[in-house]
Image (cartoon, coloured by chain):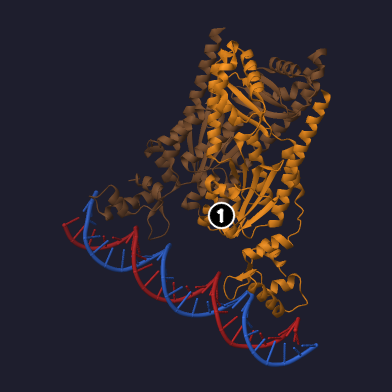
Chain colours: A brown, B orange, C blue, D red
Amino acid sequence: MLNAVEDYIQSASPITSSNIKTRCCEDLSTATLRNELNALEAMGYLRQLHTSSGRVPTAKGYRYFVNSIMGDVPLDKNILDEIHGIFENRTVYLGDMVNEIADIVSKATNYPAVVMLKGFEKLIIKNVKIVPLMTGQALILIETNSGIINNFMPAKNDIPTQTYVDASNFLTTTFSEHSVADMIQNIENYRTQMGQDLIEFCGIFDTMIDSLKRLCDKIASSGGFTARGQLRLLNSPEYHDLDKAKRVIDVLSNPAELEQIFDEPDEQEISFRIGTEIPVTDLQDCAVARADYTVDGESIASIGIIGPQRMDYAKIASALKFVVGEFANLKALEASNKGDKDEQK
Amino acid sequence: MLNAVEDYIQSASPITSSNIKTRCCEDLSTATLRNELNALEAMGYLRQLHTSSGRVPTAKGYRYFVNSIMGDVPLDKNILDEIHGIFENRTVYLGDMVNEIADIVSKATNYPAVVMLKGFEKLIIKNVKIVPLMTGQALILIETNSGIINNFMPAKNDIPTQTYVDASNFLTTTFSEHSVADMIQNIENYRTQMGQDLIEFCGIFDTMIDSLKRLCDKIASSGGFTARGQLRLLNSPEYHDLDKAKRVIDVLSNPAELEQIFDEPDEQEISFRIGTEIPVTDLQDCAVARADYTVDGESIASIGIIGPQRMDYAKIASALKFVVGEFANLKALEASNKGDKDEQK
DNA sequence: GTTAGCACTCTCATAATTTGACTGCTAATA
DNA sequence: TATTAGCAGTCAAATTATGAGAGTGCTAAC
């Protein structure tokens, strides 16, 4: 009977005895179905908006649907291809990658999406390159265990190319396997150990660390959150009321509130929080989906979807699973690549 | 008298005889002002929504305001600082820069903003670098006369670093001062001229050109447009009607329609088009601001603002002027840097 | 357990009414 | 001639009234 929740999720029009009859139970009378609906309401799965209306699921009803009824929904082939394409032709820049994933997840689900990158500063440095440019700037490339951080720094034109190569090598050998935070904090201490020939690099390191600090501040101020597809919230009839929509959209650009949703670890691959399960007052009539991408048991990134309680849970679960799967493939591929490389040694 | 347009732009409530009186003409009676308003209506600068309503400016009225009345508006210091900061600590990646500018212009004006980059493929190559990464990919950096284009390509791990250096040098010497389009089209022809020692690079060039072609296709499909701050349209009471808002927002992601606005050159530094002056049917009750950033008389990029006819023309003009000014400073700075460099030779 | 039938309730849509904000016009005034 | 007070007229927006329709709950019968 609660299968009808599925219909409601699609149509947004309340569940009535007669629409259940035409849907699945042609051989039962509406009166019988009414009795059933009555029972479900008594049990707290459904509620009436007013005496003579159909019933809509309660948070408890949605919860039951998510836990027990919801099946797998095949996603549109085009969307799957598009998601796959993003991973296949992926940019290695961490920031761009996060944007692209937030975009595509929002597009696939038709709700706003948030991606939260955890512990940016904890990323492990694998390689550092400082590439001088012709415009009086230099590009800082830090390859980490989960993508490249890139930033720019001002640079004087009169420094020879070799200096940049030496600086890059020094940084790579010194800070490889250290965290980004480590490098920023400790580079001062290493300066004394640089040796005479590296003294001339000091200027480079100072401006570089400045640039990195600015980048860290910027990321910290956003809490590591990237939200996309806010406009899609307006597609749901629940949010045709602009003020209501704005209250939710505002949360999406409020790191402090998002943190309450994404900060504590989540042991499940995909989890849903519905209504009052969400620890943010402005989202009490929303639902939030969350998927965590974990490596070695630790969550590296969280992807979240925010929408009305009547959200398409099944579709969202499928989409998030697919994305997390692509993440895992990527990591597996990199691991095997690395294996190849090691073998060649 | 038409100064009252200013008030209307701020308040969105029609101009009436009594609110003009309180505003500026305490010593005149409302009847007198009514006569004046009547005259202005007869001249086509104002119109009434209905018999007993106040008057709102017509497109002609706004036009007069923009051309003759509008003064300079000082912008909020914080916003100016923020804009300046973007140019000061600018990323040199063309794509990121465009995003940042669209974002800040939208924020400064409180309307959606569009940035159009013209003739992406016509950019002149100054330097090419292919930087191998540890993840089995390589970073392609093309420094051009107006910023860096970056892209990634798959790369085998077994190619020695020196090969990338040689390839970079070959590309730089061969295609420096050529356009990006040139390089993509003609690299085939140059392959025969590479000489025996460069034959082994062929694989690199093929994948690189593939990557670049994909990037070009992607940019071409967006028409070079980047729109940001679409949600801000909903702040204007004119667009509290969601359907109306959506029609405008849709235009912002429709390159074909945007092209009609930004394609023909615009001799003015800042121009406004109001209502029917806009060659897009869905924008007939909007206004569009446009600023062009020109180098040597040729427009490199256009920045556009789309909003209701009752938009804050003065503030927008100030913001756009400031941004264009920052662009010019940047270019001047680069030129002087280059001068320094040349002198040192 | 199921069902037909009927009274009941409440929303939504539409129509009628009232209110209030402005205007236009006229005639008087400076 | 420019200005003004005063008043009638108009229309939108808010308010209230009316009716139709969708859906339920309940009861009594099967």
- Of B288 and B19, the residue lying toward us: B288
Q: Is residue B175 above or below residue A251?
A: above
> Residue B265's spot in the image, x, y percent?
64, 47
Q: Is residue B152 above or below residue D20?
A: above
- Of B154 and B221, the residue lying toward us: B221
For badge 1, the amino acid type reads Pro
Give left or right: position of D17 versus B140.
Answer: left
The single residue placed furthest to the top in the displayed view is A345
Residue A269 in view, yes or no: no
- Identify the secondary structure beneath mark 1: loop
The image quarter in which residue B67 lies? bottom right
> Residue A262's spot in the image, x, y percent?
57, 36
> Residue B182's spot in the image, x, y percent?
59, 29
Q: Please state the chain letter of the residue tagged with numbered disc 1 in the rendered image.
A: B
> Residue A143's spot in the image, x, y percent?
63, 22
How many numbered badges does the structure rendering display?
1
- Provide the residue designation for mark 1: B279
- Of A227 and B13, the residue lying toward us: B13
Give left or right: position of A257 versus A106.
Answer: right
Residue B260 in view, yes or no: yes
How many residues crowd mark 1 within 10 Å: few (<14), some (14–19), many (20+)? some
- Of A230 and D2, the residue lying toward us: D2
Q: Is residue B272 above or below residue A135?
A: below
Residue plotted at (45% across, 45% down): A311
Quadrant including the C terminus of chain A:
top right
